[in-house]
Amino acid sequence: MKRIAVFASGSGSNFQVIAEQFPVEFVFSDHRDAFMLERAQNLGVTSYAFELKEFENKVVYEEAIVELLDQHEIDLVCLAGYMKIVGPILLSAYEGRIINIHPAYLPEFPGAHGIQDAWEAGVDESGVTIHWVDSGVDTGQIIKQVRVPRLPDDTFETFEARIHEAEYKLYPKVLRELGVKEK
Ligand code: GRF
């Protein structure tokens, strides 16, 4: 069985979708006040939260994360709105075992504002991508992606909601394809 951990920084709606369908060993948040921690509690999923600023530097912070992953014997780390770049300590320990969801059709619109950047560029369609994590920002090998249209009467909010709906379908699909067993 493949054991998964989910990393998120904020709302955690992708985490919730994953946790409803798959056993999640734990969630990690790099913000102690993230809403996703409430979701974890409601879902009965173990959670850990600590912040980079509580550590001497990012090396020590990531060493603490690697320790958690090792302790829980995690096979696959699922980033879902984890807003930090994965550094060399975490990457070297878990390379090839970390995936990320990005709310655009990579390599289009990488970075922290994929939905907004696509919207502002006036595209007819954007998308969602799940990819392996490497040392770049949203540059790792693509696992699967889907196109999401921008409709003529969309507002930013309706467009954004359609992107999120696509995320909620794509993440479970990719996890199944990677051999993660459902609940
Ligand atoms: C998602 O759109 C994800 O693709 C992006 O950050 C957002 C996180 O949303 N990286 P949530 O925390 O899962 O609600």
Image (cartoon, rainbow, N blue to C red):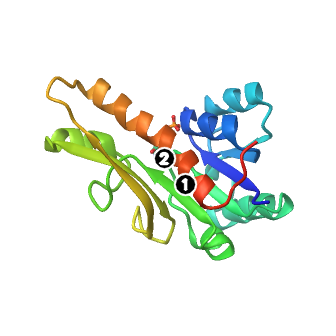
From the image, tell me which residue sits under label 2. 170
Q: Residue at x 26, y 57 (%)?
A: 108
Is there CB contact under 8 Å for labels 2 and 1?
yes
| Closer-to-camera residue (46/183) | 183
Residue at disc 1, CB closer than 8 Å to ligand 1: no
User: Residue 33's mark?
Assistant: none
Inspect the image, locate mark 1, and give the three-letter code of the amino acid beneath it. Answer: Val
Residue 138 is situated, as x and y percent measured from the top left of the image, at 41, 61
| Tally of numbered discs | 2
Determine if residue 41 is in view: yes
Can you say whether 20 is above or below 103 in the image? above
Inspect the image, locate mark 2, and give the three-letter code of the amino acid beneath it. Answer: Leu
Q: Residue at x 69, y 74 (%)?
A: 93
User: Residue 174's mark?
Assistant: 1
| Closer-to-camera residue (22/59) | 22
Badge 2 crowding class, 10 Å Cα cut-off, few under 14, some 14 to 19, many 20 or more, is some
Residue 148 is situated, as x and y percent measured from the top left of the image, at 30, 42
Q: Residue at x 70, y 52 (%)?
A: 5
SS for dot 2: helix
